[in-house]
Amino acid sequence: MVFSISKRSEVEPFHAMDVLAEATKRRAGGHPVISMAVGQPSHPAPRAALDAARTALAEGRIGYTDALGTARLKHALAWHYRDRHGLEIDPARIAVTTGSSAAFNLAFLSLFDAGDAVAIARPGYPAYRNILGALGLHVVEVPVTAETHFTLTPESLEAIQQEKGVKLKGVLLASPANPTGTVTGREGLKALAAYCDANDIAFISDEIYHGLTFAGEETTALELKGEAIVINSFSKYYCMTGWRIGWMVLPDRLVRPIERVAQSLYISPPELSQIAATAALGASEELDRVKASYAANRKLLLDRLPKIGLAPASPMDGAFYAYVDVSRFTNDSMDFARRMLAEINVAATPGLDFDPVEGPRTLRMSYAGSEAEIAEAAERIGMWLK
Ligand SMILES: Cc1ncc(COP(=O)(O)O)c(C=O)c1O
């Protein structure tokens, strides 16, 4: 018998992970590789998180928790919204997830049925397209350019629905965004949330890069009128990618549907990571020092990249990415990335991951590494391009 493989699994590979695998292989072979390919902090989890995890391990059993997370972490997250945003959030509206990646699955499964149309920005985070596609949803990519300040607007959503002849059921936006670094300000978010509210569209706000805004204002969609679904994570600002902990803040009526799906899909998020994450919420002093090092990297790249012919293709206002235009050198950024790794041991991600149309002319560099590494990478690329 020959079994078939599903059409839904025919998603694009995440090229950044392929570049990372190649970079890891070269590093193991003794090459002095600097990886700017994957969006992960080189800094470890905050000390308080590591200490809490060590204590929990020494004490013994790590088990399942409630499907939507421990009461301690949910209360600590409610405190976080009070502290950072002056908002009172009922901990019962918070769902802790296995990274924000699991939150996307849960949100899409609870909000949409197969065939529903969901809008995302192009360029944008590739997993959005792939998860939506694998779940049988209709992905509506909305090109974002300098004209729309690299973000979605009510006008662009209206136009794409006309053009494609679809009625959107959902809109997903990240601010700060990956890969463009766009920060959608309060007014922009407000307009989007109001548009979605008026048109019965679910508005999902991916706030995973909150805490990493360098220019412009950081607004959570929770401050706005309407029923936004907020997704966030400990992966970026909190430097905890491998701990796989994220969270959602949900409208009341979505909590139980999410809980039902989460119980069967994941049982619970990992307990050890929840203990560490609870402690990480109090580590902003340490984490703000890490952020300051990204700010220094950003400043260096903003200065150096245009001088070596790699002008940023978007604003770099938040997150930790430089999304650069490589069209002066190539029309094939995949080949460019491969050669850069093979010839000067610097790994970056070809734009194709983020933008199937314009991506062959762009490259994303993560500057979440150490200051010394980023300076060295800029030096090597400059010499290479000469
Ligand atoms: C915009 C965006 N959202 C979500 C994620 C997923 O992060 P995690 O599952 O580690 O929380 C990433 C990872 O790079 C991202 O860039």
Image (spheres, rainbow, N blue to C red):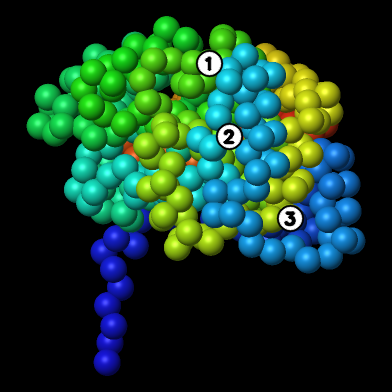
* Residue in front for this viewpoint, 13 or 60: 60
Of pointers 3 and 2, the one earlier in the residue sequence: 2
| Tag 3 and tag 2, C-beta contact below 8 Å | no
Q: Residue at x 31, y 26 (%)?
A: 143
Up-down: is 162 above or below 15?
A: above
Q: Amino acid at mark 2?
A: Pro
Distance from Cα at disc 3 to Cα at disc 2: 20 Å
Distance from Cα at disc 3 to Cα at disc 1: 30 Å
Q: Residue at x 57, y 45 (%)?
A: 96
Q: Which residue is mark 2?
A: 91
| Tag 1 and tag 2, C-beta contact below 8 Å | no
The answer to whether residue 338 is visible is: no
User: Residue 199: which quarter of the image?
Assistant: top left
Residue 276, percent across and down?
Answer: 76, 46
Question: What label does residue 266 carry, if any?
Answer: none
Q: Which residue is mark 3?
A: 272
Callout 3: 10 Å neighbours few (<14), some, many (20+)?
some
Q: Amino acid at mark 3?
A: Leu
Of pointers 1 and 2, the one earlier in the residue sequence: 2
Taking the image as shown, residue 232 lies to the left or right of residue 226, namely right
